[in-house]
Image (spheres, rainbow, N blue to C red):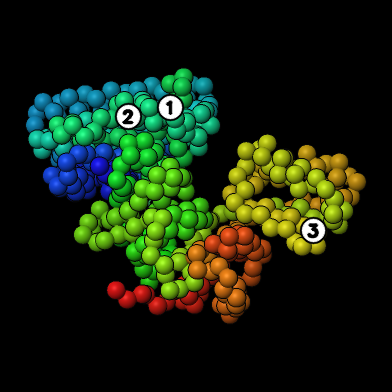
């Protein structure tokens, strides 16, 4: 049995949803059980929901117009996707009830002029509830039994709103109870991506782009044969195609390499997607809904070795670097642990760390908003060391970019960094900090945001201009 996940661009409008149904139904015909399908919200809907929440919070009536836009968009899709009158009427009643619920919640936000992270999670998950109903009704309309499943019933998380952590044991039990496959006449399940709930039944989300993660959670829980992530590109490319148009599809990649690429910003999969499937050695395929016959990328433990040192390049936009500097830190035990404990207290996620060998400075790189909070926390928590002069300054630099070069073959390749940094040097890009993982799976560095395209294009040209044959 397969898990097939379709992203926002794959369910962007009625004609795309028809293509999704074509792909799902052809799979259903050829296989004994399943597939189990996961869908994102229609493209742009999650952003609209977040804008509506922000508008309501600031007392702006715009949110009412945004609800009407959503209603029109989904009604239009129903018209194009469902010809059977009774399926259509039932669907419209459900969609309108969901949108009425949304309007009530947003009205509440307007009244209290506050949208907490908890309410934000509830609001941002409405898109998946709507798209799963639409897709399942369309498949029913084509005469195939199909059922929408709200993942809040089956995926349990903690209450870290916006980026909730999954309780795999409870979720696994709930998933296996609700999604019964293998008996031949079970329906096709269309599960909402992205959303989940706490043990108290409070709505949570798995983070932006989280539907990929939903798919792999289901894959591991149901012991699927594979997980397919259907999107709008032919697979994982050697670099973001919007930055490097000549980037090409990587046919096979290891779990570790794919994890590094996604951690460093390749949004084609959510960074947590591979966690649940690695242990079970479940292969993940990235496929293109607009080009279903293309082979895509296979992510697996036994990916074929490559004949090049670098597999791919990724980047994280809009990061800031906190530089903690001071001669007094040299050889002083405990200072690093105080720094990390302080950052952990603020909840900021550190993407990259460097320390000069002289120990004069420690650099931490985080997303801009998180860096701001982390720097404030450090000023407070390390104030004694600032007063005593052990630490001279805590500086924050904005508008930066992390670029990461990933590849298992970098291990033990002397001269690779030299080639990398001379390719950058030739283009005049200035490097502010460098880190290399001890596994030598990635080299990451910080540059000014404005240098991103130049840097990535230069590295791609130096290492990946030769597309492998075959
Ligand atoms: P979906 O809506 O299907 O979840 P996303 O927009 O989240 O799709 O992810 C697909 C997009 O990721 C592609 O359209 C592409 O622009 C971007 N992307 C960034 N880096 C890469 C990469 N290395 N390979 C493929 N796509 C990438
Ligand atoms: N709809 C959510 C988002 O836009 C989740 C997803 O698409 O994976 O982030
Ligand atoms: Mg996505």
According to the image, label 2 marks what residue? 176
Across and down, in percent, residue 149 comes to: 29, 30
Distance (Cα) linking label 2 and label 1: 10 Å
According to the image, label 3 marks what residue? 359
Q: Is mark 2 within 8 Å of ligand 2?
A: no
Check residue 45 in the rendering and tell me which mark sits there, or answer none. none
Going from the N terminus, do you reach mark 3 or mark 1 first? 1
Q: Quadrant of residue 69?
A: top left
Find out whether the residues at labels 2 and 1 contact each other: C-beta distance under 8 Å.
Answer: no
Determine the secondary structure under disc 2.
Answer: helix
Q: Is mark 3 within 8 Å of ligand 1?
A: no
* Residue 134 visible from this viewpoint: no
Distance (Cα) linking label 3 and label 1: 45 Å
Find out whether the residues at labels 3 and 1 contact each other: C-beta distance under 8 Å.
Answer: no
Q: Quadrant of residue 40?
A: top left
Across and down, in percent, residue 159 comes to: 52, 28
- Looking at the image, is mark 3 or mark 1 nearer the viewer? 1
Q: Residue at x 83, y 41 (%)?
A: 383
Q: Residue at x 53, y 32 (%)?
A: 160
Residue nearest the observer in this picture, 184 or 432: 184
- Looking at the image, is mark 3 or mark 2 nearer the viewer? 2
Horizontally, residue 318 falls left or right of residue 26, namely: right
Seen in the picture, residue 441 relative to 269 is either above or below; the reply is below
Horizontally, residue 205 falls left or right of residue 74, namely: right
Q: Residue at x 44, y 30 (%)?
A: 169
According to the image, label 1 marks what residue? 170
């Amino acid at each position: 049995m397969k898990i097939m996940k379709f992203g926002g661009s794959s369910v962007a409008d009625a004609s795309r949803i028809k293509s999704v149904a074509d792909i799902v139904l052809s799979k259903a015909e050829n296989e004994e059980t399943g597939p189990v399908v996961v869908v994102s919200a229609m493209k742009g809907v999650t952003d609209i929901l977040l804008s509506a929440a922000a508008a309501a919070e600031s007392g702006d009536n715009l949110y009412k117009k945004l609800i009407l836009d959503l209603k029109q968009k989904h009604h239009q899709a129903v018209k194009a996707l469902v010809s059977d009158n009774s399926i259509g009427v039932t669907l419209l009643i459900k969609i309108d009830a969901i949108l009425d619920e949304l309007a009530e919640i947003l009205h509440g936000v307007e009244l209290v002029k506050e949208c907490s992270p908890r309410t934000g999670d509830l609001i941002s998950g409405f898109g998946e509830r709507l798209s799963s109903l639409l897709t399942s009704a369309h498949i029913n309309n084509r005469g195939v039994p199909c059922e929408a499943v709200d993942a809040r019933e089956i995926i349990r998380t903690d209450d870290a709103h916006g980026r909730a952590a999954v309780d795999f044991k409870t979720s696994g039990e709930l998933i296996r109870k609700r999604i019964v496959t293998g008996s031949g006449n079970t329906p096709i399940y269309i599960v909402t991506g992205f959303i989940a709930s706490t043990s108290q039944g409070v709505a949570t989300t798995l983070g932006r782009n989280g539907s990929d993660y939903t798919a792999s959670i289901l894959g591991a829980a149901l012991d699927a044969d594979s997980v397919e992530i259907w999107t709008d590109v032919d697979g994982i490319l050697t670099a973001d195609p919007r930055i490097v148009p000549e980037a090409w599809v990587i046919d096979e990649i290891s779990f570790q390499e794919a994890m590094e690429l996604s951690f460093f910003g390749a949004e084609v999969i959510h960074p947590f997607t591979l966690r649940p499937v690695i242990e079970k050695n479940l292969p993940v395929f990235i496929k293109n809904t607009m080009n279903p016959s293309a082979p895509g990328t296979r992510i697996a433990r036994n990916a074929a070795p490559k004949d090049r040192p670098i597999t791919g390049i990724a980047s994280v936009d809009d990061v800031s670097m906190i530089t903690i500097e001071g001669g007094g830190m040299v050889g002083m035990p405990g200072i690093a642990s105080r720094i990390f404990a302080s950052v952990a207290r603020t909840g900021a996620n550190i993407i990259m760390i460097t320390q000069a060998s002289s120990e004069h400075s420690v650099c931490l790189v985080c997303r801009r908003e998180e860096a701001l909070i982390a720097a404030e926390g450090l000023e407070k928590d390390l104030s004694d060391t600032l007063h005593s002069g052990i630490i001279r300054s805590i500086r924050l630099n904005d508008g930066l970019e992390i670029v990461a070069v990933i590849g298992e073959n970098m291990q033990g390749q002397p001269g690779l960094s030299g080639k990398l940094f001379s390719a950058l040097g030739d283009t005049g890009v200035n490097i502010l900090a460098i880190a290399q993982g001890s596994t030598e799976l990635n080299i990451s560095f910080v540059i000014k945001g404005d240098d991103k395209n130049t840097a990535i294009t230069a590295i791609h040209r130096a290492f990946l201009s030769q597309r492998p044959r075959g």
